[in-house]
Image (cartoon, rainbow, N blue to C red):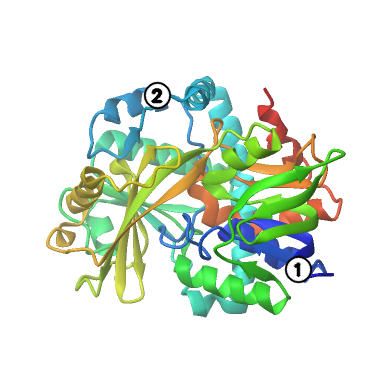
Amino acid sequence: MSQKQADVLVVGAGVVGLSVAYYAASAGAKVVVLEKGEVGAGSSSSNAGLVVPSFFEPLPGPGAIGEGLRHLFDQQGYFGIHFRPDLRLMYWLARFARHCNRREFYRHSELFMRLNGEGVQVHLELARLGGREYHFSQKGLLYLFLSAKRFIKGREKAARAMDSGLASQVFSADEVRDVEPAAGRAVIGGIRFLTDAGLDPAKFLEWLARQAAAWGVRVMTETEVFDFQLGRNRVNSVFTTKGEFRGEQVVLAGGAWLAPLGRRLGVNLPVEGGKGFSQTFLKPGMNVRQPLILDEHHVAVSPLANALRITGALELSGLDLTINPDRVRGIHRSACRYLPLIEPLHPSEIWRGLRPCTPDGLPLVGRLHSLNNVIVAGGHDTKGMTLGPLTGQYVTRLLAGQSIGDFEHRLSPGRFRL
């Protein structure tokens, strides 16, 4: 088999693509990964690094449209839409609105509880192999609240999670400052989900790439896929900036770029880029004991080795990677309301990445009906780190002709056929 032939071609070297490559290669396949940039250059390397069973609520839900509109014109708010004359965006927003109902919200939440539960178990298996190398730590995730209304909603969420076996602790204002001394006086309470974990995402991607390479995976960086040769209901060749590649099976794990890849194949993959921003402070001079979620403002705080990272915002921006300075300032300002010691800090790195978001909030994991040797793996929005390795296992089963149970229907990319 030549260097440009493989059993499996994986498009994308983020957490999903590398997980697919690792598990498929360990099952005996020859795997080549095609990455248009560098490993983890999309949204996988400088994100919050959270493995979060507590993130079981889908993006669309009751009140999501109203809350989104409320923040729409606040350039420092956590949510925004980069409006543009694009029928695909209008289609996405219309489908999103259709899924903002109570019935689907609870139905999809139940599905995510199951997926996230499996996802954290896969992470624990990987951590036993190399967790020290990427600073994996299961200390839980502490949500901090400023308002009584949001604290009540948080306790309701924790009660629902407890019914499904997801353990949590509720803290009063005084108790939460014992648990997290960095919390300011404005914080009125907290809820810690005990099975959540954190890791250094860049180091995790590096470790995962090394493990994949040990199984013979070749990762071709700076190799952009721009077209496909189709024939007899399959992809025969993949055309890249470094030539033509052939694979018996092709896995699309291109994150926010799934939609244009799908268009080259003549299929509808309604994935919209949800741009997020992170700010990393080296040697911040303040100690945060555990990963945090600053609830009202949807900001994550991640303690890393010799650094602190705050992550937030969701701008529906297509593939636009422009940094919005107002949004960056808004994230910092929001964090200061919960953690006053952050106020004088200046970031050593400001980063942005595109979360791949689907209109119903569920990932796309499954084989295309029209092209029987193509599998799609993506659309995890804020749950990519949590579900990436599990998705790698699921795709490996699909590559072998095995089933992934009822997830196969619920996550099928065919659910969005026009």
On residue 210, the disc is none
Q: Secondary structure at mark 1?
A: helix
In the image, what residue occupies the spot 55% across and 48% down?
A: 255
Percent x, y of residue 4: 75, 65
Determine whether label 2 and label 1 are within 8 Å by CB: no
In the image, what residue occupies the spot 67% across and 72% down?
A: 212
Q: Is 43 placed left or right of 277 in the picture?
A: right
Of tags 2 and 1, the one toward the viewer is: 1
Q: Secondary structure at mark 2?
A: helix
Quarter of the picture containing the C terminus is top right
Name the residue tied to disc 1. Answer: 25
In the rendered image, the vertical position of residue 329 relative to residue 91, given as above or below: below
Q: Amino acid at mark 1?
A: Ala
In the image, what residue occupies the spot 64% across and 31% down?
A: 268
Name the residue tied to disc 2. Answer: 65
- Circle nearer the N terminus (2, 1): 1
Quick one: 208 or 387, which is closer to the camera? Answer: 208
